[in-house]
Amino acid sequence: MRRSLAFAWRRILDVALSTDPQRRVPMSMALLALLIMASSAGVLLLLAEANETMNVTSVRWWAGLSVAGLLVLTLLVRFDQAAKLGDPSLTVPQMVWAITSGAVAYVLAGEARGIVPSLLAMILFFGAFALTTGEVIGIGIYALAAFGCAIAVCARLSASTSAYIETAYALMVLIVLGGCVALNLRIQRIRLKLQRQREALAEALAVNRELATRDELTGLVNRRAMQDLMALEQRRALRTGRPLMLAQLDIDHFKPINDTHGHATGDRALQAFAGTVRACVRDTDVLARWGGEEFVLMLAETTPEDARDLLERVRHEVEAVAIPHASGVLRLTVSAGLAQHRPDDSIDHTLERADQALYTAKALGRNRVALAPPSKPAVGTSALA
């Protein structure tokens, strides 16, 4: 029974608020505004029946038009017609209509018009979290004009009411209006401050994410992020059957660069090397700093022949790099070991084969590319899931 009631209640909410999560919030606020207006109209009708100074017919017409106007705006929000007007929640039109109705109610309420300022306060606070600063000021100006006209009309029509009472009513309206606008502006400043803080936090989180996946010196993908990318590319290669090549790159004689010219020159050499290699490879290729002067290059959907040609081009471009320093110009060379990934092998084993090919290139005199021969998977290794 309880489950049936819960299901029925959810169905009612879906019909009333829609099933679109983006429309449910503005729709619920529109229904709340309609409920407040209907309740206020009911209170004024009750007063009209008990107060001989109020015109019951006029109040009934006012109540019907006020509720009907908000009902039309609510239906526009519900059936997504408001989005075509550029304001999915129609907050400003709802507030303008409610203020207009409140100003008319101030005139119709006669000696009971003292209840209207509370209605005005609810109207002005209703859109406090949905309006911009400019809209808050605009709504405040409109409310001042509307109730200014209502006060002027009451001053001409209320011959029997004391001037002091009329002045008190008018001052109360102005106090409520001014206070609500001031508080709304304060809320807007708080919202703006919170929004800036959220943006700063989001920017800081983005920087942290970037630092977690990037090498700070070269801007390349770091080792941890590269391992995730290789595992992902391995699964893709296994699914499509397309070749995957991994290369280990090592700057030749890098330690003497740091020892002779200093770590600042070594850092510039690493940056120059990373920029040169990145300019040679495709956008789909991934270059990562593996550690120190060691780098790993992942070449997806690339045959061994094409991969070797690309690494030869990289080698020639690196050889042409000139890095100025205090005592002259520094030249770089690179050795590379290349291995084709086997579908039934592990990424770690493929990297080991590429590393062995790199040692071969170094043993043969450095500044060259060596291709690892095909081999069986290493005993005890398994492909990454």
Image (tube, rainbow, N blue to C red):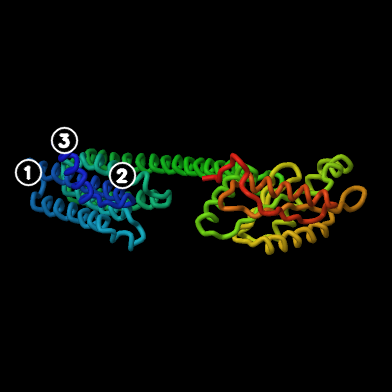
> Which secondary structure, mark 3?
helix
Which residue in the structure is indicated by mark 3? Answer: 2
Q: Farthest right residue? A: 327
Mark toward the viewer: 1 or 2: 2
Give the residue type that dot 3 points to.
Arg
User: Mark 2 or mark 3, which has the lower sequence index?
Assistant: 3
Quadrant containing the N terminus in the rendered view = top left
Which residue in the structure is indicated by mark 2? Answer: 126
Give the residue type that dot 2 points to.
Phe
* Image coordinates for residue 371, horizontal then vertical, percent: 72, 55
* Image coordinates for residue 329, horizontal then vertical, percent: 89, 53
**Label 1 to label 3, Cα distance in Å?**
42 Å
Give the label on residue 3, or none: none
**Label 2 to label 3, Cα distance in Å?**
34 Å
> Which secondary structure, mark 2?
helix
* Image coordinates for residue 173, horizontal then vertical, percent: 28, 42
- In this rendering, would 35 be left or right of 383? left
- Residue at 25% across / 39% down in the picture? 118
Give the residue type that dot 1 points to.
Glu
User: Mark 1 or mark 3, which has the lower sequence index?
Assistant: 3
The foreground one among 242 and 52 is 242
- Residue at 16% across / 44% down in the picture? 8
- Residue at 81% across / 43% down in the picture? 264
Mark toward the viewer: 2 or 3: 3
> Which secondary structure, mark 1?
helix
**Label 1 to label 2, Cα distance in Å?**
29 Å
Which residue in the structure is indicated by mark 1? Answer: 49
- In this rendering, would 147 be left or right of 65? right
User: Mark 1 or mark 2, which has the lower sequence index?
Assistant: 1
